[in-house]
Image (cartoon, rainbow, N blue to C red):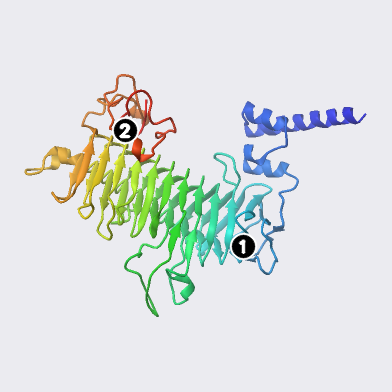
């Protein structure tokens, strides 16, 4: 009898899931996966997934008309789950004293469907203060954003000594200024200044940030060297360590798509898609990505298309590396870098594909470093080619050097004005993979010492006897 009851229960569950999946247009793989196991929120859209989940695992659910959530007052322990309930009209939420541990972070998540936070002109939609080891998540499924923040000056603000924080699967739009801001500005509280506080392990991934007044991502203080003027004198901002910004979609930003600074030990920015950036064309603030003072990073696997300024703007420590990126139709240079505020071993630009940049493909002002490296890049049709006059030539548009003091090792790059010459798979649809017969195949410089194991789409970087040129390995 028990086995028959279980069979009927399983059948009822499968039938129920079948109709849910029809409603959600689940793939056959998703239906089969969940029919054979527990219904998983990671494979369904926000509303239906959370509706099906009878228990979101909530330790505490934020009530309506609540704006401040204090973890100490609520006696929340590591591993607690704070739920935001779908259908509740949240406006601005401040989370204070939310303290988990590395092994048991506190989770802030949606429950019962997609949560909409309508911040309007308020200072923020979600803000964190004096918090550590927490995760703000709208789910785990690709393309699902279970938390949506509409408006707020800083729509999501990781502030006031927040550290060790992960933000994922959140959609942010109509920000008055920044979409996500992660930093504590220095003030007269000694806890906020360099030497006393390090913001660690800020992980921002699988978010969709669009239609912002300024930056989509503003991470770290730009006054790393110069400091910030306060009522108690000039104060140096804190540093950040372990920053990772990856797999985000960024569109229609008023200023830069991503701005990062004060990461002297390095950050990693990868697999992001940035389109239509710098729409306000604010001078010096209109780039897809800007590395400000003290900003060092590995920048790889990113797709950049359409914007007013440079694709990548680097100011500061010459220790970063830029590789495996596709940069198309920029308003300014594809990549511009300068070492005006600090020095280092040198910049490295390896296996990028840069097409139809508004000005130069790569422009280097890095004359204070021992040596810069430019290997295996495809640069096609830089728009400044026809503008140069003696003693410059059109070829300066591919790789422009400030003066003879710029030391650069340039090897095995492919420069052309002809979009058809590299034999891309489909330049008209922005697919810059290499077709059979491409002159870039097996013509690259040996980069085995640079630890670049995969190409732009994650294929093994070395196939055959030699490296290819450009972001893709054939």
Q: Is residue 82 above or below residue 208?
A: below
From this viewpoint, which residue is outermost toward the right? 1
The quarter of the picture where the N terminus appears is top right
Pointer 1 local density, CA inside 10 Å: few below 14, some 14–19, many at least 20 = many
Which secondary structure lies at badge 1? loop
- Say if residue 326 shows up in the picture: no
The one nearer the camera, 435 or 11, is 435
Which residue is label 1 attached to?
A: 99
Marks 1 and 2, how far apart in space? 45 Å
Q: Position of residue 335 (x, y in %)?
A: 28, 45
Q: Quadrant of residue 106?
A: bottom right
Q: Is residue 245 left or right of residue 229?
A: right
Front position in the image: 413 or 204: 413
Residue 428 spot, x, y in % from top left: 34, 28
Q: Which residue is mark 2?
A: 470
Q: Which residue is at 69% across, 48% downward?
A: 112
* Label at residue 211: none
Tell me: residue 88, above or below residue 448: below
């Amino acid at each position: 009898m028990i086995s028959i009851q279980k069979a009927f229960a399983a059948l009822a569950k499968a039938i129920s899931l079948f109709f849910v999946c029809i409603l959600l247009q689940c793939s056959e793989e998703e239906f089969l996966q969940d029919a054979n196991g527990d219904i998983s929120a990671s494979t369904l859209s926000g509303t239906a997934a959370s509706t099906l989940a009878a228990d979101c695992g909530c330790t505490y659910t934020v009530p309506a008309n609540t704006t401040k959530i204090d973890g100490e007052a609520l006696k929340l322990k590591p591993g607690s789950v704070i739920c935001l309930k779908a259908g509740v009209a949240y406006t601005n939420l401040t989370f204070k004293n939310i303290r988990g541990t590395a092994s048991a972070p506190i989770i802030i998540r949606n429950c019962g469907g997609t949560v909409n936070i309508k911040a309007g002109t308020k200072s923020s939609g979600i803000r964190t203060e004096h918090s550590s080891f927490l995760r703000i998540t709208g789910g785990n499924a690709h393309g699902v954003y279970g938390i949506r923040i509409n408006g707020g000056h800083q729509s999501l603000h990781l502030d006031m000594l927040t550290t060790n924080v992960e933000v994922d699967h959140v959609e942010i739009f109509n920000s008055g200024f920044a979409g996500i801001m992660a930093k504590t500005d220095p003030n007269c509280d000694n806890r906020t200044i360099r030497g006393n506080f390090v913001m660690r392990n800020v992980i921002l991934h699988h978010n969709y940030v669009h239609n912002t007044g300024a930056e989509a991502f503003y991470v770290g203080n730009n006054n790393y060297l110069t400091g910030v003027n306060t009522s108690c004198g000039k104060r140096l901002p804190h540093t950040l360590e372990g920053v990772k910004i990856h797999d985000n979609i960024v569109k229609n930003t008023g200023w830069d798509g991503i701005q990062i600074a004060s990461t002297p030990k390095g950050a990693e920015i990868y697999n992001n898609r940035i389109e239509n950036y710098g729409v306000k064309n604010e001078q010096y603030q209109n780039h897809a990505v800007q590395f400000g003072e003290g900003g060092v990073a590995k920048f790889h696997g990113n797709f950049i298309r359409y914007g007013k300024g440079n694709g990548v703007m680097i100011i500061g420590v010459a220790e970063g590396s830029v590789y495996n990126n596709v940069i198309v139709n920029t308003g300014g240079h594809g990549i511009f870098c300068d070492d005006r505020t600090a020095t280092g071993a040198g910049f490295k630009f390896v296996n990028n594909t840069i097409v139809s940049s508004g000005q130069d493909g790569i422009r280097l002002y890095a004359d204070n470093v021992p040596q810069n490296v430019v290997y295996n890049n495809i640069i096609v049709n830089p728009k400044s080619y026809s503008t140069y006059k003696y003693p410059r030539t059109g070829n300066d548009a591919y790789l422009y050097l400030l003066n003879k003091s710029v030391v650069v090792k340039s090897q095995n790059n492919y420069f052309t004005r002809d979009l058809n010459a590299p034999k891309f798979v489909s330049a008209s649809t922005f697919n810059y993979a290499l077709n059979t017969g491409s002159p870039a195949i097996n013509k690259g410089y040996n980069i085995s010492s640079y630890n670049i194991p995969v190409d732009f789409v994650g294929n093994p970087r070395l196939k055959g006897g030699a490296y290819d040129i450009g972001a893709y390995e054939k």
